[in-house]
């Protein structure tokens, strides 16, 4: 069994501004249902969290800058931790996530290396 | 008055939580900032809802979701005022002193909520706005509908909805409409406008020719919810408000029987009366009872009483047609309308047979106001079918079919035509 981080990327917030409240509610319920199903079936380890869109960036010269990437076309919006056999299985799980139903939604799947080298 | 509207039960509250939260927040923040800053308010509310969506989809819904969203909205507001140069002047005038923060908190507090919503309702249903602007504006700001949903229900283009809402907001700002419950001297006239908008809103939901039944029902529920809100405010809770709410509930209690499993409209005559919602019907009876002082009956009273007679009958055949005809006579005397005439003729047809109804309808045939009204043609089809003139019936059903976009109406007409054979 391997563990994976799902990194949810999507359009920055402004793009969600024409979403109607009822649509938001449906989307939220779909997410809650998906994460709940994951816990039930055992592949969801941690539902994760959303990330605020603002932050700081510190570079090599120790220069600190404001780090919202809100002007970027796509931004990391949150993450979850999933467990399953391999990357292919993780990709199948990602396909069922409501996050990719919204236009511009994208999930990056990265294996957690701390589980040790593959046998 | 006993009991509450079903909209108040926890399950339903959760059901349209985002919509209603949007309406509550807009009403509360407009009270704080004034109508002039409508756009700032709407942006803030939208941003707060998006943040809720983003966070809750991972973490689930917090214990006090409303309080959560209010806190976010408040922080957003303060953030905008601090950082956005566009609002520098506003920020100075409001200040971020303890006092103004306290007043922001008080505007957002639950005990102001009903008052805020009523202010918003009276603002959106201002007599200076035409009803075709007031309805979309109310649906958007008070009920939290999206523009696409409104367009779908009112059968107009999304761009038209946006334009009407935009103009309505500008007009309210330009006329410096005050954001308040009207004083007693204006109340009666202003309340009439609110009643009228809610009545039309309900009708749009009830009769509009859209195929999507869910959104229509939502609009009806919203109209009833807002009318119920009026009954909670002593200044607004008069006989007419009760009659209007009774009227809405008498119709709403039949929702479950109006569309069959294939999505076809089921006429009153064919509805399974067991499916009617007795609880809503009893509620409607109570409201009509409270509304009753026969010397000041409005058209809402009369329409509610007609709907009541339909609800009370244990079968279509046993409907009290003479009473219904008498009520239509009163309606027509106070407010002539070809649609009332049509409905009266249908009732007469039930009492005296199709030939009598057809004679009554003779003049309506050429009434230009009904030229595109598919229910006129459908009624002719029905009456000719019952008189055994099948060819004529077929022509009218076909013509009715060409005049409606509603999938449920079309399905019903299609079945009628196939029953007639070719």
Image: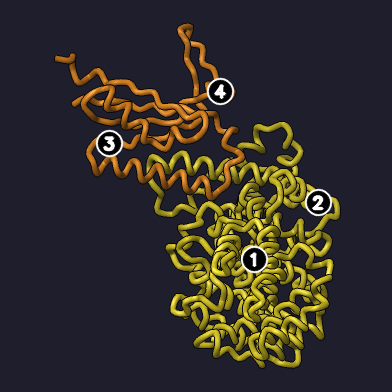
State whether discs 1 and 2 lie on one chain.
yes
Residue nearer the viewer, B69 or B88: B69
In the rendered structure, the residue with mark 2 lies on which chain? B
Please give the residue where the numbered disc 3 appears in the rendered image: A44
Q: Label 4 belongs to which residue? A: A73
Disc 3 element: strand
Q: Earlier in the sequence, mark 1 or mark 2?
A: 2
How far is the residue under mark 2 from the one under mark 3?
51 Å
Quadrant in the picture for residue A97 = top left
Q: Distance between the Cα atoms at labels 3 and 1? A: 46 Å
Q: Residue tagged by mark 2?
A: B173
Q: Name the element at disc 4.
A: loop
Total of numbered circles in the picture?
4
Q: Earlier in the sequence, mark 3 or mark 4?
A: 3
Which chain can be seen in yellow? Answer: B
Tag nearer the camera, 3 or 1: 1
| Residue for point 52% across, 75% down | B253
Distance in Å between CA atoms under marks 1 and 2: 33 Å
Q: CA distance from mark 3 to mark 4?
A: 28 Å
Please tell me which residue lies in front, B329 or B264.
B264
Residue B78 image offset from top left, x and y in percent: 62, 41
Can residue B112 be seen? Answer: no
Q: Which mark is on residue B207?
A: 1
Q: From the viewer's perspective, is the residue at label 2 or at label 3 nearer?
A: 3
């Amino acid at each position: 069994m391997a563990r994976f981080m799902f990194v949810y990327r999507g359009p920055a917030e402004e793009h969600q501004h024409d979403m109607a409240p009822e649509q938001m509610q449906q989307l939220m319920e779909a997410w809650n249902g998906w994460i709940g199903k994951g816990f039930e079936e055992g592949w969801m380890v941690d539902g994760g969290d959303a990330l605020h869109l603002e932050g700081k960036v510190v570079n090599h010269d120790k220069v600190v800058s404001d780090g919202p990437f809100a002007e970027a076309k796509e931004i990391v919006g949150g993450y979850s931790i999933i467990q399953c056999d391999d990357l292919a299985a993780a990709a199948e799980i990602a396909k069922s996530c409501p996050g990719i139903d919204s236009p511009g939604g994208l999930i990056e799947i990265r294996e957690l290396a701390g589980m040790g080298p593959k046998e | 008055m006993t009991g509450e509207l079903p909209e108040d039960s926890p399950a339903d509250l959760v059901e349209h939580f985002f919509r209603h939260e949007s309406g509550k927040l807009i009403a509360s923040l407009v009270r704080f900032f004034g109508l002039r800053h409508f756009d700032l308010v709407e942006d803030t509310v939208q941003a707060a809802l998006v943040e809720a969506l983003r966070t809750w989809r991972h973490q689930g819904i917090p214990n006090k979701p409303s309080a959560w969203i209010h806190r976010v909205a408040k922080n957003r507001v303060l953030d905008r005022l601090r950082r956005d140069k566009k609002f520098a002047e506003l920020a100075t005038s409001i200040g971020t002193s303890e006092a103004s923060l306290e007043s922001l908190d008080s505007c957002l507090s639950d005990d102001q909520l009903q008052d805020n919503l009523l202010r918003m309702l009276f603002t959106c249903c201002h007599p200076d706005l035409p009803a075709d602007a007031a309805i979309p504006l109310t649906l958007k700001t008070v009920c939290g509908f999206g523009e696409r949903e409104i367009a779908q229900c009112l059968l107009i283009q999304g761009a038209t909805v946006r334009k009407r809402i935009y103009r309505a907001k500008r007009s309210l700002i330009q006329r410096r409409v005050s954001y308040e419950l009207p004083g007693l001297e204006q109340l009666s006239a202003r309340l009439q406008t609110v009643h009228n908008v809610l009545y039309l809103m309900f009708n749009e939901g009830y009769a509009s020719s859209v195929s999507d039944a869910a959104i229509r029902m939502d609009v009806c529920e919203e109209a009833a919810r807002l009318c119920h809100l009026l009954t909670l405010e002593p200044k607004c809770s008069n006989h007419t408000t009760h009659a209007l709410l009774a009227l809405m509930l008498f119709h709403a209690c039949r929702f479950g029987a109006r569309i069959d499993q294939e999505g076809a409209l089921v006429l009153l005559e064919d509805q399974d009366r067991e499916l009617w919602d007795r609880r809503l019907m009893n509620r409607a009876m109570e409201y009509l009872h409270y509304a009753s002082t026969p010397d000041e009956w409005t058209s809402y009273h009369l329409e509610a009483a007609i709907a009541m007679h339909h609800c009370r009958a244990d079968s279509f055949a046993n409907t009290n047609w003479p009473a219904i005809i008498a009520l239509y006579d009163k309606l027509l005397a106070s407010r002539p309308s070809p649609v009332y005439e049509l409905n009266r003729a249908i009732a007469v047809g039930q009492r005296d047979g199709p030939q009598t109804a057809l004679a009554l309808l003779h003049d309506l045939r050429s009434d230009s106001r009904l030229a595109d009204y598919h229910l006129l043609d459908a009624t002719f089809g029905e009456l000719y079918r019952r008189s055994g003139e099948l060819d004529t019936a077929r022509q009218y059903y076909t013509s009715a079919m060409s005049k409606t976009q509603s999938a449920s109406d079309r399905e019903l007409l299609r079945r009628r035509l196939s029953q007639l054979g070719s």
